[in-house]
Amino acid sequence: MDQVSRDHIKQIYAIFAHRPALWTALRAISAAPHVVLRVTTPFVGVGEAKNIEASSLALSATQSGALSYTDRMRHFTCKGEKWRFLNVYDRRVERNDDIPANRFVVHFIRYSTRLLKDCARQVVTDEILCEYEARFRRLAARIHAIGSALSPHLQTATLSRLPLDDQILQFHPHYRVVLDAYLACESIG
């Protein structure tokens, strides 16, 4: 292993070992990833609906299977006939953590784990650096443990392209720390 590779290994180790802010940021993000509220309006049965808006009833009435002619309980009367709703559009607000910034954190965790394991394999062949092997393995295990704390659907998420910096930096400053560490790794490699 030449001197350039030794310096490369030491720089990578410095990024992960000497950045307590990185570990704090990763733990904080995995414990409470940033969420956005997403409004959906699924077409559901009246019994399932929780938040029917009056403005959506007219739209619901135009859908097939939304109304039923009835003799009993009615929702409205039209031309002397009683009608009731079977299905309506229900307004739902859901928390969603599947955003570009969180996908980037998952990407960083996978990238870091792979990078640290590769480094651990490289240092075994160099007697000067073999002391780093256990350190790299511990760092990789630590990052993997943090990643496994993320929600299950984020663990399986893929990142088709890296998000733009502003898609990451508009969230909590912890995301900036992760982005800086990623850029530092990329600049070495």
Image (tube, rainbow, N blue to C red):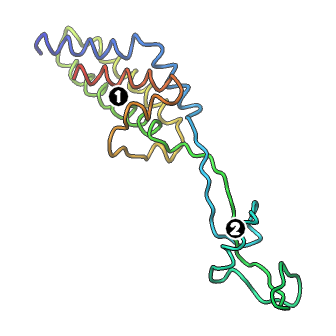
Q: Write down the residue under mark 1.
A: 112
Q: Write down the residue under mark 2.
A: 56
Neighbourhood count class around disc 2 (C-alpha, 10 Å): few under 14, some 14–19, many 20 upward? some
Q: Dividing the picture into quarters, in which one does residue 111 lie?
A: top left
Which three-letter amino acid code belongs to the residue tagged 1?
Ser
Q: Position of residue 2 (x, y in %)?
A: 10, 13
Q: Dividing the picture into quarters, in which one does residue 165 lie?
A: top left
Q: Name the residue furthest left.
A: 2
Residue at (74% x, 78% y) in the render: 86
- Quadrant where the N terminus sits is top left
Q: Position of residue 63 (x, y in %)?
A: 63, 79
27 vs 129, nearest the viewer: 27
For residue 13, above or below residue 82 = above
From the viewer's perspective, tell me whether residue 62 is left or right of residue 49: left
CB within 8 Å, label 2 to label 1 = no
Q: Position of residue 9 (x, y in %)?
A: 24, 16
From the viewer's perspective, tell me whether residue 179 is left or right of residue 28: left
Q: Dividing the picture into quarters, in which one does residue 185 lie?
A: top left
Residue at (42% x, 24% y) in the render: 178
Neighbourhood count class around disc 1 (C-alpha, 10 Å): few under 14, some 14–19, many 20 upward? many
102 vs 124, nearest the viewer: 102
Query: Which callout, 2 or 1, points to the residue nearer the camera?
Result: 2
User: Which secondary structure, mark 1?
Assistant: helix
Residue at (72% x, 83% y) in the render: 67
- Total labels drawn: 2
Q: Position of residue 70 (x, y in %)?
A: 82, 89
135 vs 179, nearest the viewer: 179
Which three-letter amino acid code belongs to the residue tagged 2?
Ser
Inter-mark Cα distance, 2 to 1 = 48 Å
Residue at (20% x, 8% y) in the render: 128
For residue 165, above or below residue 25 = below
Q: Name the residue furthest front.
A: 79
